[in-house]
Image (cartoon, rainbow, N blue to C red):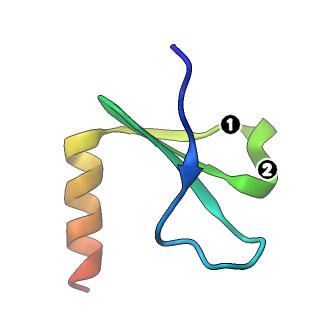
Amino acid sequence: MTETWHKSSYSTSGSHCVEVSEGTETLVRDTRNRPLGHLSAPTPEWAALLAAVRYQ
């Protein structure tokens, strides 16, 4: 499966960006360090994490 990556809406306009790929799993990687790999989480759990962080 080929992931489709895009810049996260939480990234700034500078060169320090986070990219995400969304599907059954949400993948997250550092734009500047793509060769180091990515983090993955089931999409419902990722959404719950973001919701929890927003209210902190």
Residue drawn 61% across and 79% down? Answer: 12
The one nearer the camera, 26 or 7, is: 7
Residue drawn 51% across and 61% down? Answer: 8
Residue drawn 75% across and 43% down? Answer: 34
Seen as rendered, the residue at the extreme bottom is 56
The one nearer the camera, 56 or 9, is: 9
Residue topped by disc 2: 33
Q: Look at label 1 and name its amino acid.
A: Gly
25 left or right, relative to 2: left
Mark 2 surroundings: few (<14), some (14-19) or many (≥20) residues within 10 A: few
Seen as rendered, the residue at the extreme top is 1
Mark 1 surroundings: few (<14), some (14-19) or many (≥20) residues within 10 A: few
54 left or right, relative to 6: left
The one nearer the camera, 42 or 3, is: 3
Residue 28 in the image: state x and y as whole percent: 53, 47
- Quarter in which the C terminus is drawn: bottom left
6 left or right, relative to 16: left
Q: Is residue 1 above or below residue 4?
A: above
Dividing the picture into quadrants, the one containing residue 7 is: bottom right
Q: Is residue 53 above or below residue 7?
A: below
Residue topped by disc 1: 37
Q: Is residue 42 above or below residue 29?
A: above
Q: CA distance from mark 1 to mark 2?
A: 8 Å
Residue drawn 56% across and 49% down? Answer: 6
